[in-house]
Image (cartoon, rainbow, N blue to C red):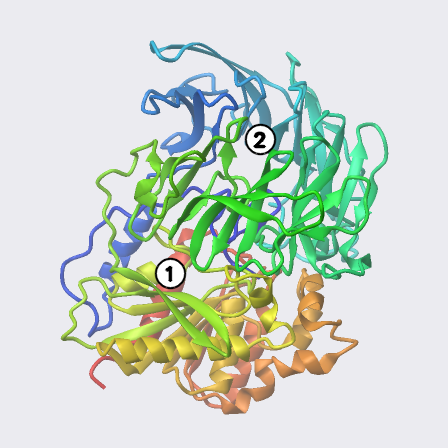
Amino acid sequence: MSGIVNRSFGRSIFVPAVMFLACWIAALPGTSLAQDKPAPAQVEEVLKGLNKSHGLGPVAISPDGLLLAYVRPTSNGAQVLVAPFADPARTTRVTAAKKDDERCGESRVAWAPDSRRLAFVGNCAGGGQDDLFVASIGGDFASGKPKVEVERLTEAKGEIGYPEFSPDGSKIAFLYVEGATRAAGALAAMKPWAGVIGEDGVEIQRVAMVDAAAHKSASPTFLTPAQLHVYEFDWSPDSKSLAYVAADPPGENNWWVAKLYIEELGSVPRAIFAPAESSGRLHGLQIAVPRWSPDGRSIAFIGGLMSDQGSTGGDVWLLPSTGGEPRDLTPERPTSAAWITWGDETHLFVSELHGGDSQLVRLQVPADGRTAGVDETIYSFSGSVGDGRLELSLSSTRDHGLFVFHASSFDHPPEIYAARTASKTVTDISGLQQLTHVNDGVEKIWGPVESLSWKNDGFDVQGWLHFPKNYDPAKKYGLIVLVHGGPAAAAMSGWGGRGSLSGTAFSALGYFVLEPNPRGSYGQGEAFTAANRKDFGYGDLRDILAGVDMVLAKNPAIDPTRVGLTGWSYGGFMTMFAVTQTNRFKAAVAGAGISNWQSYYGENSIDQWMTPYFGASVYQDPAVYAKSSAINFIDKIKTPTLAVVGDRDGECPAPQSFEFWHALRDEHVPTQLVVYPNEGHGFVNPEHRTDVLLRALDWFAKYMPAGE
């Protein structure tokens, strides 16, 4: 229920892994908007800035560290560029297009072990169908005379993504949904219900393969069976086997009960770990990012309580490749690991969330069963990172002496950066080696942002406070509390706007904004992430209200009578539930919310995610679901609340918003419900995203007017 990004081909949670990073380049007029309802033209000025982007897509450094490949959107579509790492401004386009000005899209870059072949996905063969291509990179980049030859390797019919060369360079495996009729994952708009529900039209994501040395295109060869939906995979060091996380179809619902499989090419898969069958601490929890050790004897992975496929966080675990019970390498560590890679047989590099910061550390993996220790921190700073594959994933050289990724923060627009493991720990994004300058001169249009921390119920809670653009301490401002989705996710420092309800947009339009990371969030360790189990809306609301109290006490420019609440997905639930528990909020906007966990269980397309949180199905323990259902406390609501939702949302179906709206209307509480056609959980129509923000601003201005 993240509402940020959760699809099988991409994700990210904190930062969308498959979406280009947006840059804001418009500037607002210099007058403060704190006292008045923003004019539509002023709102459009902000949104215009959101749409004028200098974007950066997936990025990869060659194993030898000499060449950089990345995706850059242009007026003719996304293009793959290659440049010398030593001179990244000297780019060469790698294209499958017949003409340079032909409009088509390319993405998903992956280097071969020889550092001279680059796989990528593109639709330049025509018809809008993505296929896998390989570019042979030769010539002399340093002298400006590179040579690039591109060959198409597949004749795909469906959705294709995540290419990975085998360690010996002979094969390329990738995820493939043959005959796909919609984007994979629960964020995309659901197909209209028809036929035998749960049986007809189920699309299965599998691992497919092509010969990397083929000189003609062919239909992909499937490696994994038709009865398993695969989410992530990794090659064995000898290129003879795969490790992958998979579950029975339908894949978008069953990730929460997925197992870890080993499959020798040409053989049958063997499940080596099933959390649902485990007697250890991972019983009933989730696993992600399997990574085979260099000697092939072990598989490391991330395990923990996760609310969305692709929104990864937890501890780092180690399992013999023959199977058995895994051991936790990072128990009690006050961070959330999101991505891992082996450095050598005794070290793992871990990309993790620490409080609200991105962090990369090197763990020493002891052989005697002890806890892994951190022997190096490469960077730890407020910002968002990623290479465009998985959440917080990074691209590295063969020797892992160099990591490359795109990064941004509230103060730094997105660029591609590099971090070296042999250097002093980087504590600010400006300390990284900047490789691109596509956003030089871009200035933010929102106000300053501070990282805050406070204590509540014995927990350390972190959050972000946005100041209004053109902040004047002599004026009074409203405060909007923006709760993230998930709940296993986190609000992080990053450039631009994320979703229709954006802290930076509200800041640019004259509001203070608090983005809290209450219990249930990533960044403070597994105990913190699991602290809202069987307690949705209670402890996390207390954490949020404690943050509001602190912000009000420290900032007299905030009018305590003008505090609003909003959020999307789990944040939408928190909005609906909070207004039944407190009258602190003067106005609320619930995006894709959940008002009744009991009816929700039977309506959504991802009901498996709830059992780890509630401890049982709704049919086994309806009381625990009723406890956190806003609908059961509806007579307590006094707060005017706007509800917005997509009509084809499978994660938080529209009937949940209908129930809430209908109840408020019967209770004579000011309310509106807006349903957007052909939208799923993540809105794709720019006009609809704009409309959500405009309606939210109008709602807050109406019920939190200045000068009361």
Front one among 295 and 161: 295
Q: Residue at x 54, y 81 (%)?
A: 662
Q: Which residue is drawn at 61% across and 80% down?
A: 629
* Label at residue 261: none
User: Is residue 182 toward the left or the right of residue 66 in the image?
Assistant: right
Residue 305: image quadrant is: bottom right
Front one among 215 and 320: 320
Question: Residue 132's x, y, as percent?
Answer: 60, 25
Front one among 21 and 637: 21
Secondary structure beneath dot 2 equals: loop
* Marks 2 and 1 in Cβ contact (< 8 Å): no
Closer to the chain start, of discs 2 and 1, is 2
Amino acid type at circle 2 is Asp
Please identify the quadrant where the C terminus is shown. Answer: bottom left
* Label at residue 502: 1
Q: In this view, does 422 lie above or below 327?
A: above
Residue named by callout 2: 130
Residue 640 appears anywhere in the view: yes
Question: Residue 85's x, y, as percent?
Answer: 39, 23
